Image (cartoon, coloured by chain):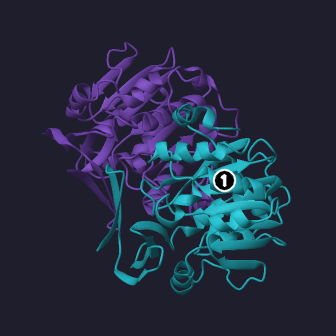
Chain colours: A cyan, B purple
């Protein structure tokens, strides 16, 4: 039995799974969980592989710690989406940081607590979980509230579609402090350059620094994926990278050398991005 | 119509192809060529995707230029395998370098000249092609002949099996000058860590520096792949990286920042490799 995902009609991949553990149709999306010998439990939303036990640490560490170590003194972090709890957990490894998390789909949180209990840090008193629409949340939020916003969304279809447009990023810019920054799931220069460039362009309408960085995930088509960091002030590689994450025990992917290396672009990517790359 | 490849019984991937252009059974292996809209022509050997037009430059640039820019003054380079001609072509972009190439399967060269004519630089007078067994070639070669050996082989099955053992590397070490180095196709820490570690171990029996580096290829399962650089003298990242490749026009992947970044290891890889990583 294989869980198979097709992307763009020219590339597909599949991983072997043993059984389906759960299937829930929420008001927003279809959520499935499979069990796999090699990858552990696998979360699937609307037919797209979201994460698996084996390598979830890569996504979550790379979204959280790159942002946390670019900002010089982050205290208030907003996570949009991220219902599995992994991004918030990684942020909370940094002491004295408070996380507001806004997930639209309560069923994702329930499923994650049951089938991926080690991923979240749900009982942490510095975590404030709201079940609600992230788009509405940023619209109604007071200006200059946050040091960092992390947009841990699915692809731009279904409930996440509104997390990729200029109205949303106008509000993200507004609620960030003057030295604030955002990291978003940025699709992939590897498997879908046009979509990646589109997101770069939207973020670039507001932020003076917009830079993609790479990581890998078994669950994503082509396995190579990007986050995009957009910043009002701090630069993720030109400034000295804070090595505070190197001091955190138990990180399995992130270190300060990986931080710098993940931002390096092959020639063809530089050429494709052109002025969309604001560094 | 899909060209599908299964690896290790837990991961498979497929790319859409339009038609089969060629199929040849040579004395050594089955060679196929497919045409694909997205990837251009695709070379398949014994059922494994070897390369495609779309991203062959990544493999070939990363094997050739990392070695060429680690060595301070390379003049004589031996390419074992590499029958598509791509690695030799990239080496030959560096002026005054002479390449000996030993490919066991003449049919691979013929097919490559016909279906991938832009990949090779076959008429270059600085290229000396021998059709023969690379294992025999290094056994019979005089000592200290080469600055660089590049082992551009298929997986360790069929004719390439003998390119992964200690007898072969004893000879590679012997035919390299005192400041020589070798780069080999190193399988993948991402999709097959045990095999990757095995190759690291064999190379580490002879060389004082043994370091893997990463790149990506659509044709390979999981798309993330490794070369391994083993060196008698020059260090690929601690020394100043020569920027001579940055001066070559038309490189689409390699630059000196990519050179350095590709050697950076995530924490879990460092931990897995342990003493096999000799830097």
Left or right, B95 with respect to A240, comes to left
Residue A24 percent across, percent down from the top left: 42, 82
Q: Is residue B234 visible?
A: no
Task: Identify residue for label 1.
Answer: A169
Q: Residue at x 29, y 24 (%)?
A: B117
What is the quadrant of residue B72 in the picture? top right
Left or right, B222 with respect to A70, comes to left
Q: Secondary structure at mark 1?
A: helix
Left or right, B95 with respect to B18, comes to right
Looking at the image, which is closer to me, B24 or A144? A144
Q: Residue at x 73, y 66 (%)?
A: A140
If the image is split into quadrants, where does the N terminus of chain A sit?
bottom left
Residue B71 percent across, percent down from the top left: 59, 29
Q: Is residue A278 above or below residue B197?
A: above
If the image is split into quadrants, where does the C terminus of chain A sit?
top right
Q: Crowdedness of circle 1 by 10 Å Cα count: few (<14), some, many (20+)?
A: many
Looking at the image, which is closer to me, B203 or A164? A164
Residue B2 percent across, percent down from the top left: 23, 52
Q: Residue at x 55, y 20 (%)?
A: B248
Residue B10 percent across, percent down from the top left: 35, 68
Q: Is residue B2 above or below residue A128?
A: above
């Amino acid at each position: 039995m294989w869980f198979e995902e097709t992307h763009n009609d020219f590339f597909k991949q599949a991983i072997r799974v043993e059984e389906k553990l759960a299937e829930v149709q929420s008001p927003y999306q279809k959520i499935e969980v499979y069990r796999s010998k090699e990858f552990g439990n696998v979360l699937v939303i609307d037919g797209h592989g979201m994460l698996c036990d084996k390598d979830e640490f890569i996504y979550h560490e790379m979204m959280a710690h790159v942002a946390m170590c670019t900002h010089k003194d982050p205290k208030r972090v907003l996570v949009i989406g991220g219902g599995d709890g992994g991004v918030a957990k990684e942020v909370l490894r940094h002491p004295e940081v408070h996380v507001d998390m806004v997930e639209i789909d309560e069923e994702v949180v329930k499923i994650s607590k049951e089938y991926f209990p080690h991923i979240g840090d749900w009982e942490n008193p510095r975590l404030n979980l709201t079940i609600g629409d992230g788009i509405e949340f940023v619209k109604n939020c007071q200006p200059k509230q946050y040091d960092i916003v992390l947009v841990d969304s699915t692809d731009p279809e279904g409930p996440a579609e509104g997390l990729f447009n200029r109205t949303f990023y106008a509000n993200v810019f507004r609620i960030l402090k003057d030295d604030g920054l955002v990291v978003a799931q940025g699709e992939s220069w590897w498997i879908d350059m046009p979509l990646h460039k589109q997101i770069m362009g939207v973020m670039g309408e507001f932020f003076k620094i917009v830079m993609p960085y790479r990581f890998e995930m078994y669950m994503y088509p082509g396995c190579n994926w990007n986050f995009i960091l957009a910043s009002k002030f701090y630069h993720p590689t030109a400034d000295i990278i804070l090595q505070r994450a190197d001091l955190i025990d138990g990180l399995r992917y992130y270190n300060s050398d990986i931080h710098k290396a993940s931002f390096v672009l092959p020639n063809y990517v530089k050429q494709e991005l052109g002025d969309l790359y604001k560094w």
